[in-house]
Image (spheres, helix red, strand yellow):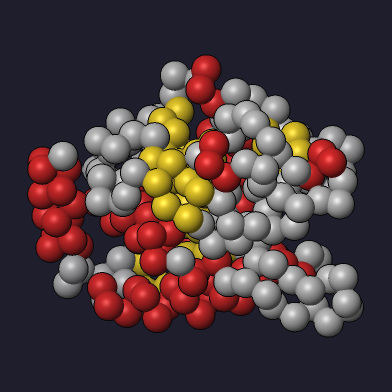
């Protein structure tokens, strides 16, 4: 525990003073909850990164997911979707297979066939993320008690054993990540959260089960987090924002710890 703490502290000192470049891709066209998160992220990240002398750029132009652009950045973020064009997908895979770093949020892992986001990219969904296809979700967006799964991991060493998240729509996946030796699960839904969701559909309320919400893949410098869906007043047609993802200090600490770890990892994540 102490060695992990000293490791993160040393990373903070090493990284501080050195300009790091982060590029966030997003689409922000359809679901108002995802659009709300993207706008929130594009405010929160630059304000937070200024403390560390990091540069934050964001774009909805996915054609910039090309070798020349990706090579200029230390970390790539996917805020809500994924690249669709074959050349963009090939560029991202090459970037990751040659030491690039990535953090993805919520809908960036979504895949469902048939849908507007088919599961038609096996490397990304099965090899890289490991999660496979979307299975189901909770509704409404609700806060959950999250459990730290690998307390010895540098990303989560300074988090409490459990903490309450910001409200979110939680996803279930087709693949059991516990059976994937390449995956290190960092956070999962704690049983104290159940029942999770309010419906109205019974399937949108989880009463039991195991649900990972943040993990890494030891073959890549990557972190995926399921958070990234704000609560929106759809029912009354106002589209008013009812919650914010970056309102939660423990959750924010997890995100910042992840970015420091990715930036300073000169080797593949354990």
Residue 44 in picture, x, y percent from top left: 47, 76
For residue 216, above or below residue 16: above
Q: Is residue 91 left or right of residue 137?
A: left
User: Which quadrant holds the C terminus?
Assistant: top left
Q: Is residue 270 left or right of residue 60?
A: left
Please give the name of the residue rendered at 34% of the width and 44% of the height, measured from the top-left corner: 161
Please give the name of the residue rendered at 81% of the width and 51% of the height, measured from the top-left corner: 199
Q: Is residue 220 left or right of residue 6?
A: right
Residue 245 in picture, x, y percent from top left: 55, 66
For residue 17, above or below residue 266: below
Residue 187 in picture, x, y percent from top left: 45, 41
Q: Report if residue 29 is visible in the image.
A: no
Q: For residue 181, what is the image quadrant? A: top left
Q: Nearer the viewer, residue 20 or 79?
A: 79
User: Which quadrant holds the N terminus?
Assistant: top left
Residue 24 in picture, x, y percent from top left: 52, 64
Please give the name of the residue rendered at 31% of the width and 55% of the height, measured from the top-left corner: 257
Q: Is residue 37 left or right of residue 213?
A: right
């Amino acid at each position: 525990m102490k060695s992990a703490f000293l490791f993160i502290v040393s990373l903070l000192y090493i990284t501080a003073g050195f300009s790091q470049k982060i590029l966030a891709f997003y689409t922000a066209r359809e679901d108002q909850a995802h659009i709300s998160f993207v706008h929130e992220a594009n405010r929160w990240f630059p304000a937070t990164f200024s403390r560390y002398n990091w540069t934050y750029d964001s774009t909805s132009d996915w054609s910039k997911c090309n070798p020349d652009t990706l090579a200029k950045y230390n970390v790539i973020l996917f805020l809500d979707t994924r690249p669709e064009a074959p050349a963009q997908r090939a560029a991202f895979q090459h970037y990751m297979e040659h030491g690039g770093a990535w953090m993805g949020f919520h809908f960036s892992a979504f895949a469902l066939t048939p849908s507007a986001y088919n599961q038609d990219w096996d490397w990304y969904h099965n090899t890289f993320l490991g999660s496979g296809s979307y299975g189901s979700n909770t509704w409404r967006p609700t806060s959950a008690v999250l459990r730290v799964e690998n307390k010895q991991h540098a990303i989560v060493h300074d988090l409490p054993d459990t903490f309450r998240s910001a409200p979110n729509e939680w996803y279930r996946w087709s693949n059991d990540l516990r059976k994937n030796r390449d995956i290190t699960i960092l956070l999962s839904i704690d049983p104290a959260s159940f029942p999770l969701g309010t419906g109205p559909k019974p399937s949108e309320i989880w009463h039991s089960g195991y649900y990972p919400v943040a993990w890494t893949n030891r073959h890549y410098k990557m972190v995926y987090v399921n958070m990234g869906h704000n609560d929106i007043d759809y029912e009354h047609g106002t589209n008013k924002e009812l919650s914010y993802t970056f309102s939660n200090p423990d959750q924010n600490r997890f995100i910042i710890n992840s970015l420091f770890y990715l930036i300073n990892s000169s080797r593949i994540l354990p």
